[in-house]
Amino acid sequence: MSGMLDALGLGLSVAATPTNLWYCFLGALIGTLIGVLPGLGPIATMAMLLPLTYYLEPTAALIMLAGIYYGAQYGGSTTAILMRVPGESSSVVTCLDGYEMARRGRAGTALATAALASFFAGTVTTLLIAFFSPPLTAMAQKFGPAEYFSLMVLGLIAAVVFAQGSLLRSFGMILLGLLLGLVGADVNTGLDRFTFGYPELRDGIGIAALSMGVFGIAEIVLNLGKPQGEGGKRQAISAMRLTRADFRAAWPATLRGTGLGALLGILPGGSAMMGSFAAYSIEKKLSKTPERFGQGAIEGVAGPEAANNAGAQASFIPMLALGIPSNSVMAMMAGAMLIHGIAPSPNLASAQPKLFWGLIASMWIGNLMLLVINLPLIGLWVRLLAVPYRLLFPAILLFCCIGIYTVNSSVLEVAMLAIFGLAGVVLSLLKCPLAPLVLAFILGPLMEENLRRAMLLSNGNAAIFLSPISIALLLAALVLLALILLPSFRKVRAVAAEE
């Protein structure tokens, strides 16, 4: 316990430096803005900001990107409650009861409930990350190349099984991501692979160009094709306080939402949206008066808001402890680490203790900042919705092109950005999930490296993959594949994707 307290003390000393506090505040502020504005989510924003991280210290860059992610979960609830316009997909459920509370003159109560539930969930999940990451890291440090390879196979299969949409399309995205990850010079022989004579590709395709294209540029183009709805009428903001009856109804829902969101956030392919939908469903089933839901039930705000924030932060556990990004947002975080030459791995806590614990401590500070950012500035956030999207997208596109060009001063990078943007639009229209693509692109080269290293160590003997840990991981992967064959699992998966 003393070692844990020392580590948290180290983290707070790192996160509380003026520079890191500024980037934590900046990330939380940008995240809130992105959460308020419909159509531009945290994934696209983090992808667009990846080039800027070249010029930041690794700890500051990760603190800012993390703030954008969990800050977006806060911001999305503001317009969902006041205008029935969910800024984030995870805030869709909040519209159901939050907007009804606002219509009944309780907008302040709904906003306070959402903010306090999110803060509580963020605080609890930050402690979970602090306590569970070191044991998982210690276990994973026993891994060799064979175990690493098996772990990554499990991660990719889990991403396919739990991804939204068609399984066949998810497998296709995994294969495409692995193929793109092969571009560049061979690690062992130095021979070029799939570079097509372009020397700029010898180092491989840049994560910034790929992620900014398929998430950022594609998101902008797709949003331009959508009608810009007005949403609901803005409701007046009442006093931001909870009565004793409100508190008695909200705190059990907050606890359940926190636990459920944290559990679903840890799972590969888990997301804040999944947690919020599941929390709302559970609260409605447990309620003695389920007919109140959709009519302004405070539990319908507290549970989902706690779940989406807990899910957002719990998804850091697999990446920090095992080096495996569990969703596309964590892939962005892993990409930022790779930009700075830091490979996501279980050795992160021992190799980069200031970065590891500084990032964890910054999450609690960021959640505290979000209370200050969100509640007093609600009127400002709502007024930002009056800015037409057609006026925003040219500036965003210009920012993307300048950012990607300044990375290597390469015109080819800008061309690749356009190509991946077009590919992202086509894949989205074909309803192909993009998260498995980015996960496979990041994990593919690491899988190849560990596979070849394992075979070199064993002189080509595949028995090296029969160690107890490796067998357990591969069996877990086979179990996940077997789940797909079960009609009941396919039915549940289809219903969850539809919701």
Image (cartoon, grey):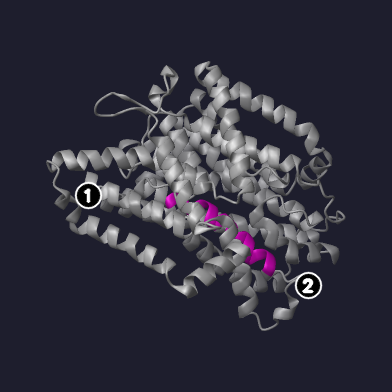
Q: Residue at x 37, y 33 (%)?
A: 342
Q: Residue, x 71% and y 50% (percent of image)?
A: 87
Residue 102: % across, % down:
81, 62
- Image quadrant of residue 308? bottom right
Which element is circle 1 on? loop
Residue 427 horizontal side relative to residue 16, left or right: right
* 141 relative to 97, above or below: above
Check disc 1: other Cα within 10 Å, few if <14, some if 14-19, many if 20+.
few
Badge number at residue 142 = 1
Q: Residue 444 sits in which quadrant?
A: top left
Work out whether residue 353 or residue 336 is closer to the camera in this orientation and state it: 336
**Percent x, y for residue 186?**
30, 28
Label 2: which residue? 295
Which quarter of the rendering shows the C terminus? Answer: bottom right
The magenta segment is 300-317
- From the top left corner, tell me how far across and down residue 164 is, in percent: 55, 57
